[in-house]
Image (cartoon, coloured by chain):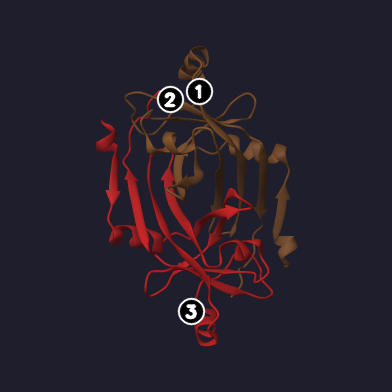
Chain colours: A brown, B red
Amino acid sequence: MSQNDALRSLDRQECLRLLAKAPVGRVVYTRQALPAVLPVNFCLDTDFSVLLRTSPDSDLVRAIDGVVVAFEADEFDAATQSGWSVVVTGRATVVTDPAEHERLSHSGPTSWMPLHDAVFVRIESGIVTGRELRGTHGAR
Amino acid sequence: MSQNDALRSLDRQECLRLLAKAPVGRVVYTRQALPAVLPVNFCLDTDFSVLLRTSPDSDLVRAIDGVVVAFEADEFDAATQSGWSVVVTGRATVVTDPAEHERLSHSGPTSWMPLHDAVFVRIESGIVTGRELRGTHGAR
């Protein structure tokens, strides 16, 4: 099997469909000039932007508000050596509009981590790329 | 359950033990001034550095050789809303020593992706951090 046969690029619609079913993704950003990554729960909004719920005084909010970040989700199966990954690259902004905050409090993302107070962060789905790895027997 | 009860920091030894059993991790780096992330197979070397096997002409190699990157692995269970994540931050370097390359060809990481030719990349385990999320019922 060649590398081209093993890997397939996913179109935007396939990427968003896969993203919608993942419970956890990873925010990729820069913290104190070093690459950083943090797993978070998320959901997709009606415009397919990625929504996170986090603590307003978190390091994450301070680091990413107004900044272009990457957001990744994937799923792999070790038994079949197959899976997919999707990356969204876009600007992250804290939701400050009270009506929007209220809407997301009811219909927005939840978090597996208990939060006393919460803010929502939106990551625009500017660039969406993905790839599917079909099963192979590995290379050594 | 408070946020402190839900999240526990993992020490270096716990982190390395969890890393050792994960089949896939994610390299976090910068590509053309944008945050980037790529899932890869890996293994830990005897000095606990992270080892990847990839194509010598890959974008990844060009982007990370000689550069500080982050490397993340995690495992989450949606049913219990629990899991762990570990992040290694350190310099990535392509293995150029022929004897070392030969050693890793036999005992080093494999890849689920077929590779005609392969190079090995070592990520020093300079900073190793991790956290465990204990089960909770989420926050809305």
Q: Residue furthest top?
A: A99
Disc nearest the viewer among 1 and 3: 1
Residue contact at pointers 1 and 3, CB within 8 angstroms = no
Front-most of residues B78 and A69? A69
Q: CA distance from mark 1 to mark 2?
A: 7 Å
Where residue A127 sits: x, y (%)?
67, 40
- Residue marked by disc 1: A95
Q: Against A136, is B102 above or below?
A: below
Chain containing the residue with disc 3: B
Q: Against B71, is B135 above or below?
A: above
Q: CA distance from mark 1 to mark 3?
A: 49 Å
Front-most of residues A56 and A53? A56
Where residue A4 sits: x, y (%)?
74, 62
The quarter holding residue B17 reads bottom left
Where residue A38 sits: x, y (%)?
44, 44
Q: Against A65, is B12 above or below?
A: below
SS for dot 1? loop
Q: Residue furthest bottom?
A: B99
Drawn side of residue B136 relative to residue A86, left or right: left
Quarter the C terminus of chain B occupies? top left
Which residue is located at x 50 percent, y 75 percent? B108
Which residue is located at x 61 percent, y 45 percent? A87
Three-letter code, disc 1: Val
Three-letter code, disc 3: Ser
Chain containing the residue with disc 2: A
Q: Total of numbered circles in the picture? A: 3
- Residue marked by disc 2: A119
- Residue marked by disc 3: B107
SS for dot 2? strand
Drawn side of residue B27 relative to residue B45, left or right: right
The quarter holding residue A117 reads top left
